[in-house]
Structure formats: C-alpha cells, structure tokens
C-alpha cells in the first residue's frame, strides 16, 4: 500500500466520522416559569428591600460611584461610604428598566 493511499484513507475516516451538528438557532424554553412565591409574597419581599435600602443602605467604596449616586438623588454619607435610597428613587429607576432583554454570552 502506498503512502498516498494511506493518507487518503485517514483523511476520509476523519471526515466521515465527525459529529453531525444541527444548524445554530436561538434556544427557547418551552416550559412556563416556576411559581415559587405568590404575588403577595413577592410584594412583601419588595417592600422589605425598599425598607433596607432606605434605613440601612449599601456601602460603596468607590468615590466615583458615590458621586454618581448623589447626582442621581441618593443620600450619600461620605464618612461611612453608605448610600441610602428613597423608595421613590428606587421605583423611578425600576420603571425605567426594560421589561425584557437578550442576554449575550
């Protein structure tokens, strides 16, 4: 058997034994989302989070972030680097968020 013939045989076996793939398409989830909390429970969680953001706040260690948050209406305490948010401010920015988006990886 010649070298050329052996090479052809190997090349054919590599191409014929490859994995057949379906054409790419955006995957879709056919199942409805799980309901792990009722609407009332979700509202309770939301109200509790608003209270935490209003009363306790969040620590931001970056001065630029503190500046931006202050410019947009948050209550900034530079000595402790804590930022508190009024419920109205949170609701305002929630209203600006899109209802859906595409996640790209």
Image (cartoon, grey):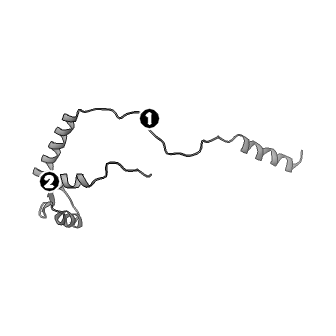
Alpha carbons under labels 1 and 2: distance apart: 37 Å
* Residue ranking furthest to the right: 1
Question: Foreground: 73 or 62?
Answer: 73
Q: Quadrant of residue 32?
A: top left
* Residue ranking furthest to the left: 55
Q: Is residue 24 above or below residue 77?
A: above
User: Residue at position x 14%, y 51% from top?
Assistant: 87
The picture places residue 63, in percent across and down from the top left corner, at: 21, 66
The picture places residue 42, in percent across and down from the top left corner, at: 21, 38
Mark 2 or mark 1, which is nearer the start of the sequence?
1
**In the drawing, what numbered circle is on residue 88?**
2
The picture places residue 73, in percent across and down from the top left corner, at: 15, 62
Question: Which quadrant holds the N terminus?
Answer: top right
User: Residue at position x 70%, y 40% from top?
Assistant: 17
Disc 1 designates what residue?
30
The picture places residue 93, in percent across and down from the top left corner, at: 22, 55
User: Residue at position x 41%, y 33% from top?
Assistant: 31
Q: Is residue 23 above or below residue 30?
A: below
The kind of secondary structure element at disc 1 is loop
Left or right relative to 3: residue 25: left
Q: Is residue 28 above or below residue 79?
A: above
How many neighbours does mark 1 have within 10 angstroms: few (below 14), some (14-19), or many (20 or more)? few
Left or right relative to 91: residue 12: right
Q: Quadrant of residue 13?
A: top right
């Amino acid at each position: 058997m010649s070298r050329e013939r052996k090479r052809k045989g190997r090349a054919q076996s590599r191409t014929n034994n490859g994995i057949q793939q379906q054409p790419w398409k955006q995957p879709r989830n056919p199942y409805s989302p799980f309901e792990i909390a009722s609407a009332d429970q979700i509202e309770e969680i939301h109200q509790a989070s608003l209270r935490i953001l209003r009363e306790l706040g969040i620590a931001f260690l970056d001065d630029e972030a503190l500046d931006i948050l202050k410019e947009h209406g948050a209550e900034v305490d530079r000595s402790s680097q804590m930022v508190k948010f009024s419920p109205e401010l949170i609701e305002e920015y929630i209203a600006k968020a899109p209802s859906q988006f595409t996640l790209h990886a």
